[in-house]
Amino acid sequence: MHFDTVIRHGTVVTASDVFKSDVGIIDGRVAALAAGLADADEIIDARGLYVMPGGIDSHVHLDQPSGPGIVMADGFDSGTRSAAIGGNTTVLAFCMQEKGQSLRSALKAYHAKAEGHCHVDAAFHLVITDPSAAVLGQELPALVADGYTSIKIFMTYEGLRLRDDEILSTLDAARRTGALAMVHCENEDAIRYLIGRHEAEGLLEPRYHATTRPIAAEREATHRALSLAEIVDTPIVIVHVSNRQAMEEIRRARERGQKIAGETCPQYLMLTAEDLDGDALEGAKYVCSPPPRDRESQEACWNGIEQGVFELFSSDHCPFRFNDSEGKSNERGKQSFRWIPNGIPGVATRLPILFSEGVVKGRIDLNQFVAVTSTNHAKLYGLYPRKGTIAIGADADIALWDPDQEVVITNDILQHGSDYTPYEGLAVRGWPVRTLLRGQTIMQDGHLSKATASGIYLRRTLSSLARNCAETNSV
Ligand code: URP
Ligand code: ZN
Ligand code: ZN
């Protein structure tokens, strides 16, 4: 058999196996897994490297409106460039519905922002902020049938949050259509009350972002989201879980028989509220929601990954520039933490951090690493088995991983639009040396190797978690 590309002498890692094999690629797909493949236009020597499915980051914010005068640091070009640097081959970004806007018109705008600019493949979650009868009854079923098979709803942020009755009607519609619902769980009323109290007392520095969004506000909202999902019998994903109490809510809901997925992120393993405590505005670099907590919460999130409470390890990449009047250092943000845009960059550092801190330090094995960074994302968001594994017929989306390469993370190597990384100076072991997207090398040794952005939009099938609950099965 003649191949376009053969990856030779590597160790293939999937969510279930680790084995020595060459990988033969034809027309962008894996065509053979065997020893001794040699007849190819291009031979890549992967001796000493792991050959892993490219990372799938299912929680990435790109080119989203973020309030008056605030500009997100990454569009689809720089955000997906940075994703490729970090060994990813697919991102799932958010398409944000504005109040009164149809989902179709929001999608049109996001497709226009993304198309022709993506260096990795991409798809959109639909953020529903205005769950009108037309949106839930007509648009959502049609869009799910068209391959937009996941939504996100917020319980916090004025202007985005849904009331409980709106959450119920949205989850009910999600179940009927087979859309998988991601839920951001924080109690907005409690947070607003605490923000008011802090401001009245003159407590305005970035560190008070953390004290106005306490664990109890996340735990309560997580419990409520799970209860509302139970009432309408709908599977949900609890996203960006930061602490043990919220995690235990997920565990208990599963024990009751609910279909729930859990997600955590690097910031909840690596940062604490003390990082928000820097000199002057320095703490603004770490402002995200939910906020990083404490060492005990970090340990809990590790336990959640190790024990499978969290199937998903995502970046929640939501980048703003620090030294920028349209970013973290905006004039109002200097006056009060409440105006510091929420979010931190992380799409390039997600995989190296989990590999170094998780695999190298013996907390998780290679299979778990692949599962929580790629395979489970593909299964839960309707991309499997095309994406998320190395198998005959799958897209040849591959990260060649050097387990011994030592890198000190610095902002300049990440190629995102932000002017900082929260992980500056962190030494990691294990790094992606080459990324292939559908058989084509898109990144090698820290350089994007194609001038044109070759990522495509991905139409998705129903989630493995939601598909059996759907009343129709049109995709
Ligand atoms: O602070 C964060 N996480 N910003 C991104 C928006 C979100 O809630 O995911
Ligand atoms: Zn969120
Ligand atoms: Zn997010």
Image (tube, grey):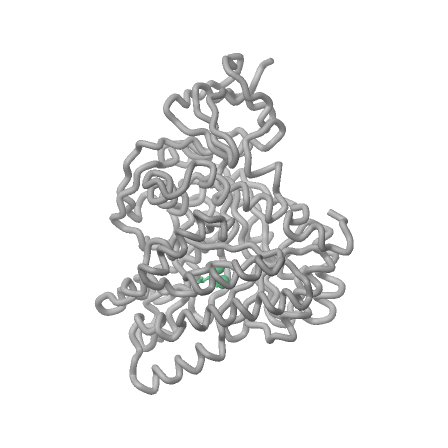
In this rendered view, identify the residue nearer to me: 276 or 292.
292
Tell me residue 42's x, y (percent).
49, 19
Up/down of 347 relative to 95, above or below: above
Kindly give the residue lying farthest to the left in the view shown.
279
Left or right of 129? Residue 138 is right
Seen in the picture, residue 426 relative to 272 is either above or below; the reply is above
Report x, y in % for residue 124: 59, 53
Q: Where is residue 252 in the image (x, y as percent from the top left)?
A: 54, 61
Q: Which residue lies furthest to the bottom in this view?
A: 200
Q: Is residue 200 above or below residue 280?
A: below
Residue 202 vs residue 335, the one in the foreground: 202
> Which residue corresponds to the image point at 44% horizontal and 77% vertical from the top-left?
191
Viewer-closest of 180 and 136: 180
In the figure, residue 137 lies in which quadrant?
bottom right
385 lies above or below 320: above
Residue drawn 60% across and 23% down?
A: 31
